Amino acid sequence: MAEVNEYNSASVDPSKFPDKDFELYSVPAFETGTPEFVKGKDISSSKKSVSRNDVLLCKINPHLNRAWIVSHYKEDIPCLASSEWIIFRNSAILPQYLSFCFTSNYFKELMLSNVSGVGGSLMRAQPAIVYKYLFPLPPINEQCRIVAAIQKYYDILDDISTNL
């Protein structure tokens, strides 16, 4: 992963901008599917600067391998991600494809085999180790085909669950 990751870590201390609005991708907000929109004064620690189509991979237990694609809903405010995300960026890889890879059982098992910490919710995957993972990287047209096929089956499952 490290060989194709274009993300260069950039930290921001939002408390230095107390009245500025931020689009915050936090682990708790993942459940809602929408980032939080908060003032700098309401953010307690430094965060990582992220951009549209960055793929966020959760590194904290019990939410390992949750993946979130940064949408950047409001162009006029900066996007931030909590430090509990491993950030992946590559303009030549479909973010949806990466998201499907990162949430696969294969990838989850890799992450679970390399967590460390004192136990429970304090267990974390180490980004330096995760960046060493191999993942399949087909040409972009094949990525499109794979994403379309997976999405088709998710849509079918959604229809089934809606009709139950």
Image: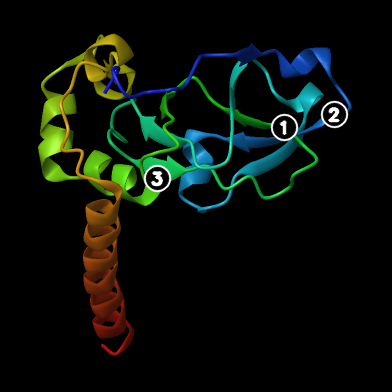
Q: Residue at x 18, y 22 (%)?
A: 133
Q: Position of residue 101 (x, y in %)?
A: 23, 43
Q: What sort of colour scheme is used for the picture?
A: rainbow
- Residue 132 falls in image quadrant: top left
**Label drawn at residue 152:** none
Q: Residues within 10 Å of mark 3 (few under 14, many from 20)?
A: many
Q: Where 33 falls versus 66 (above or below)?
A: below
Residue 17, percent from left and from top? 84, 19
Alpha-carbon distance for marks 2 and 3?
A: 28 Å
Q: Amino acid at mark 1?
A: Pro
Q: Classify 10 Å Cα crowding around label 2: few (below 14), some (14-19), many (20 and above).
A: some
Q: Can you say whether 36 is above or below 40 in the image?
A: below
Disc 1 or 3, which lies upstream in sequence?
1
Tell me which label, 2 or 1, sits earlier in the chain. Answer: 2
Q: What residue is disc 3 on?
A: 95
Hey, which residue is sitting farthest bottom in the picture? 163
Residue 59, given in percent of the width and then of the height, sits at 33, 25
In the rendered image, which quarter contains the C terminus? bottom left
Q: Quadrant of residue 134?
A: top left
At mark 2, the secondary structure is loop
Q: Which mark is residue 20?
A: 2
Q: Are marks 2 and 1 in contact (CB under 8 Å)?
A: yes
Mark 2 or 1: the one toward you: 1
Q: Nearer the viewer, residue 158 or 96?
A: 96
Badge nearest the viewer, 2 or 3: 3
Left-right relation of 17 to 93: right
The answer to whether residue 145 is above or below residue 29 is below
95 in relation to 27, above or below:
below
Q: Image point 53% across, 43% down: which residue?
A: 29
What amino acid is at disc 3?
Answer: Pro
Q: Secondary structure at mark 3?
A: helix
- Residue tagged 1: 78
